[in-house]
Amino acid sequence: MSINNENHRKVAKTAFERIVIGKPIYHGGLTVFPLMFQQTDIPEHISLENALEDKTVEITEISEDGSVPELLFANNGKEHVLLVDGEELIGAKQNRIINLSMLVAAESKLKIPVSCVEAGRWHYKSRIFSAGAFAPTSMRSRTKSETMNNARSRGVYMSNQHRVWNDVDRMMGDLGTHSESSAMHDGYEAMSSRLAEYTEMMKLPSDASGYIACIGKRVLGGDVFATSETLQKKWHRIIRSVVVESIRTGVMAEPSETEVARDFLSAASDSIAEPYSPPGIGSGVHIEGDNVIGNVLIVEEAVLHISIFAQM
């Protein structure tokens, strides 16, 4: 069941009111605030990680020739699968990231909108995709903004592909890394030991369903999921993307004050905009303000995912 359009903003607003900020975790200039979030009547669904582990899904090119901005997601399982914006998919003809969050129905196939994060390859290295990391927060922010604008003006959830490639190149330059195929994944792999250090030091409490990442007074962004289990499953992938963004800044900031995260959440709540219809099951609400961009994915009057970032 989908909710009526007039209720979208109310559901999103109520979700923000239920978020509780936990004790911050600090390491190497990066502060992460755990977020606790509870709601009832959550529709049954599983994460991409669980679906891949269970081997109930296949992610492939849409045809033998392929299409850069689209992939085919075949959910052969009996549970809906949550896909999250910024998730990296590795394999097939080139690596991609997912453009926006969506819920893929059980026992269904869906073309999903994606962006390429490997400009120098267009040939098969595998027939199916596996899960990589997440795109850096700045890339997720810009991709989200472009996807929203294209949805409004053209009815398609596409990014500016050339900008995405430029973002990957800039990330490589900032990190001092190199990739023969300009693959975002290779940049992460080159930083693996440093990323592992942060991952070990920045473990979230088991009841956290979300987070806000900050560098001093600057907010990078964050995610909130319907359950703590979903965040715990994704955290090792998400934290790598947050750390990459932090390292790129080269700033060794003092720990962030809780007020920084609280003000950002308040700004996001005050910037709830118009509803939209994502691919798959459910509805969405845009978030757009002077310094915040985001989306809320809503299914059966429950919030499955909130994604909010600083405007870039």
Image (cartoon, rainbow, N blue to C red):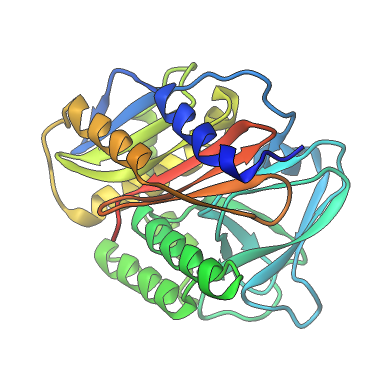
Q: Is residue 156 left or right of residue 241?
A: right
Tell me what residue is drawn at x 31 percent, y 28 percent: 33
Check the image and report above or below for 285 versus 160.
Answer: above
Q: Position of residue 62 (x, y in %)?
A: 77, 72
Q: Position of residue 90 (x, y in %)?
A: 61, 60
Which image quadrant for residue 252? top left
Tell me what residue is drawn at x 45 percent, y 56 percent: 135
Q: Position of residue 124 (x, y in %)?
A: 71, 75
Which part of the image, by quadrant, shows the C terminus?
bottom left
- Give the camera-side residue of 143 and 245: 143
Which part of the image, by quadrant, shows the N terminus?
top right
Residue 38 seen in this snapshot: yes
- Give the camera-side residue of 232 and 182: 232
Q: Position of residue 179 (x, y in %)?
A: 43, 72
Q: Residue furthest front?
A: 6
Which image quadrant for residue 42? top right
Q: Is residue 166 left or right of residue 246?
A: right
Q: Is residue 135 left or right of residue 59?
A: left
Tell me what residue is drawn at x 16 percent, y 28 percent: 257
